[in-house]
Image (cartoon, rainbow, N blue to C red):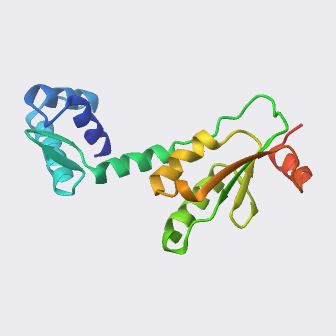
Amino acid sequence: MIAIGALVIGLGGAPSPRAMNRLLKEFTLGDTRENRRYVSRKVRNMKKQGYLAKHGVRYAVSDKGSRILSAAELENLRIPRQQHWNGTWHLVLFDIPLPESSARKAFNRILLGLGLVQYQQSVLVYPFPIRDTVLPICRFYGITKYVSFISAENIDGSEKLTKHFGLK
């Protein structure tokens, strides 16, 4: 359904017969009456669930739909690994207030899933630059103002970290 929404945006509106044909080809469905009904039903359900919003005579992905598309993009985030480590540690520090605790937990879980190591309660460390990868996560959860980035040459316990990341 998310892919259909993305295609609807790409097509610039509600599926016309020509656009419907393109949708069907994108999903490698044959252009049959049954498949047209299937795609129409999916688009109608997406509108009903609030993933699509009507703008004049056209439809576009709503805020709710955009959030889901962004969540799918978050799942595909990866930190680029460089050939050689330059000896700089990259830290992410955050102090997210209690009312945002669900965002804090999700943010921490995603960072750990990306391979960052918990250095302290709200401090995670990684040997390669991470700012460009972490900022979209911050924006998604609306916590950018609570997150800071630090690069450091020396940190306590760097021997363990070097071993953990398989550096040098």
Q: Percent x, y for residue 138?
A: 52, 52
Give the number of callouts: 0
Does any portion of residue 57 appear in the rendered image? yes
Q: Position of residue 40 (x, y in %)?
A: 13, 42
Task: Return the residue found at the far bottom.
Answer: 98
Q: Nearer the viewer, residue 103 or 24?
A: 103
Q: Quadrant of residue 123?
A: bottom right
- Decide: is 105 above or below 132: below
Q: Position of residue 109 (x, y in %)?
A: 60, 60
Where is residue 61? Give x, y as percent. Answer: 25, 44
**Residue under the image location 45 percent in, 43 percent down:** 73
Residue visible at 49% across and 73% down in the picture: 99
Q: Quadrant of residue 25?
A: top left
The C terminus sits in image quarter: top right
Of residue 87 and residue 116, the one placed in the foreground of this image is 87
In-image side of 96 versus 62 (left or right):
right
Question: In the shown orientation, is residue 107 left or right of residue 8?
Answer: right
